[in-house]
Image (cartoon, rainbow, N blue to C red):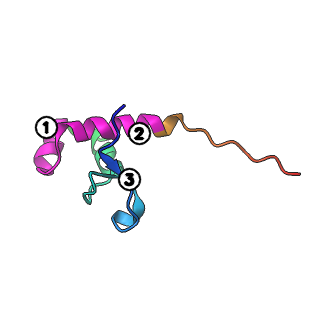
Amino acid sequence: MDVARITHDPAVMGGKPCIRGLRVTVGTVLGLLASGHSRERILAAYPYLEAPDIDAVLAYAAWRMEEREEALVGS
């Protein structure tokens, strides 16, 4: 899984995961895909994105969905 294209910088988009430090969030691209927009349409709308960026968004989202939060056991 290559998520090196996904960056986190508190100075960019409030620290949300972005693509290569650009002001395009993972959530934006994921939302466009979920809405039925094609990769080609997304790349045309954001010409500074590259096809591997979309692959990285999907890999990152899949990885995040695998994380589990465990409740802390109180004493």
Secondary structure mainly formed by the magenta segment: helix
Q: Are marks 1 and 2 in contact (CB under 8 Å)?
A: no
Q: Are marks 1 and 3 in contact (CB under 8 Å)?
A: no
Q: Is residue 29 above or below residue 55?
A: below
Residue at the spot of label 2 = 61
Name the residue located 24 percent from the left edge and 41 percent from the top edge. Answer: 53
Name the residue located 10 percent from the left edge and 46 percent from the top edge. Answer: 44
Secondary structure found at label 3 = loop
- On whether residue 6 falls in the magenta region, the answer is no
Upstream in the sequence, badge 1 or badge 2?
1
Q: Quadrant of residue 54?
A: top left
Q: Residues within 10 Å of mark 2 (few under 14, many from 20)?
A: some
Q: Quadrant of residue 38?
A: top left
Residue at the spot of label 3 = 17
Q: What amino acid is found at the position of numbered circle 2 in the picture?
A: Ala
In the rendered image, the quadrant that contains the N terminus is top left
Secondary structure found at label 2 = helix
Upstream in the sequence, badge 3 or badge 2?
3
Q: What amino acid is found at the position of numbered circle 1 in the picture?
A: Glu
- CA–CA distance in space, label 1 to label 2: 20 Å
Mark nearer the viewer, 1 or 2: 2
Name the residue located 41 percent from the left edge and 39 percent from the top edge. Answer: 61
Name the residue located 17 percent from the left edge and 47 percent from the top edge. Answer: 49
- CA–CA distance in space, label 3 to label 2: 10 Å
Residue at the spot of label 1 = 40
Q: Residues within 10 Å of mark 1 (few under 14, many from 20)?
A: few
Please state the extent of the stretch shown in magenta in the rendering: 39-63
> In the image, residue 25 lies at what x, y percent?
32, 53
The residue closer to the viewer here, 10 or 57, is 10
Left of 69 or right of it: where is 55? left
Q: What amino acid is found at the position of numbered circle 3 in the picture?
A: Pro
Q: Is residue 36 visible?
A: no
